[in-house]
Amino acid sequence: MVQEDAQPHRIGTNQRPASWHTLRFGLAGLWILDGLLQLQPGMFTMDMISTIMQPVANGEPPWLHHLIAWSILLVTPHLVTFNWTVVAIQILIGLLLLAPWPNVLKSGLWLSIVWSALVWLFGEGLGQLLTGSATFITGAPGSVFFYGVAAGLLLWSRGWRGRWPLAARLATQVVALSLLLAAALQLVPIFWTSLGLATSIGSAATMAQPAWMRAPIDWSALWASRLPVVVNALIILACLSLGVLVMAAPHSRWVVFAAICWLVVVWWIGQDLGALTSGMATDPNSAPVLALLLITGWRARRDATLVVALHPERAAEMAGS
């Protein structure tokens, strides 16, 4: 019996709740998708430098601008080798997260955290948060930041009878705080102007994509240019109210549903569905991984309910964890 009780405290055992595996498999799938996206032909050309890496440095403080510029100079002469390395690392992370062996899985989680930090610094410029024009609508603070958060929660947790219930609640609170941050970012003066707001929304429509995908983006950018104050106020109101609701009632199916619907809207209108049809997408952007964190937290509550129903003697334990 002692052996059995100790099992849930080890990563990779069969005692993991479904919500833990939801986050684990979801994160693995995102890393593998990111690795496959790096196999697109454009990633092996200078288009990756001019379209993806160089724009990240724009508007950054001098120290970060120089750091990103240095990384570009380092990568450019070895672009093909560098890209194959990125492909290998990201697919490797995904495969390690799928492994059933505890030590292999743990190494995948650590690698995910380290690689997320490097990509967030050099590839996303700390999510553009220091530029003064970062917006959640286009993906700030960056999808890879949340990859690192997800991996950290999985690594820190130690199973159903350990830290996972708290980690799952933290996953939900990360989404709530992100929505509140989104509302704060929209308060910047530039987003109250026609040019600033319409540009941030309409930039998604410049990527190669089918007409049916571009049409609602163009329509939204048009209204943002005509009524920037109204549109920006609505964005702030949506992010602020949903952030408060998710924080106050994280296990309400209606709150979770409303938040996911808003994430879908943002993913399409502002993030262009991750620009997955453009041929130059590196990841599906931040909305999907936030939805994954939200679903994980909601499903963890269902796991707790199921455990208490099957094992009433654990009710006190669940309440205290």
Image: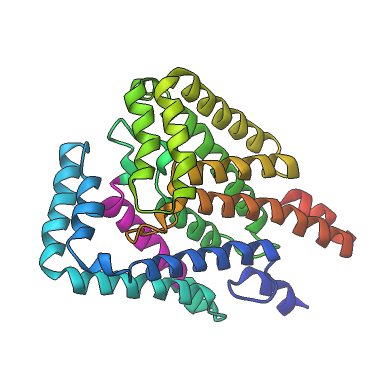
Q: Which one is in front, 78 or 246?
A: 78
**Does the magenta segment cover residue 120?**
yes
- On the rendered structure, is 71 left or right of 204? left
Question: Where does the image place residue 17, in percent across and percent down from the top left?
Answer: 70, 66
Q: Tell me the chief SS of the magenta region.
A: helix
Res. 305 visible in picture: yes
**Does the magenta segment cover residue 162?**
no
> What residue is rendered at 62% in x and 43% in y?
261
Res. 311 visible in picture: no
Q: Residue furthest front?
A: 211
Question: Where does the image place residue 198, in percent across and percent down from the top left?
Answer: 38, 30
Region in magenta: 108-125
Q: Which one is in front, 155 or 48?
A: 48
Question: Where does the image place residue 317, in percent across and percent down from the top left?
Answer: 78, 55
> What residue is rendered at 40% in x and 73% in y?
91
Vertical comparison of 154 with 182: above or below: below
> What residue is rendered at 25% in x and 69% in y?
83
Q: Residue furthest bottom?
A: 101
Q: How many marks?
A: 0
Question: Where does the image place residue 32, in percent across and percent down from the top left?
Answer: 44, 70
Q: Which one is in front, 137 or 112?
A: 137
> What residue is rendered at 51% in x and 63% in y?
27
Describe the colour scheme in one phrase: rainbow
Q: Quadrant of the N terminus?
A: bottom right
- On the rendered structure, is 319 left or right of 52? right
Vertical comparison of 101 with 317: above or below: below
- On the rendered structure, is 271 left or right of 79? right
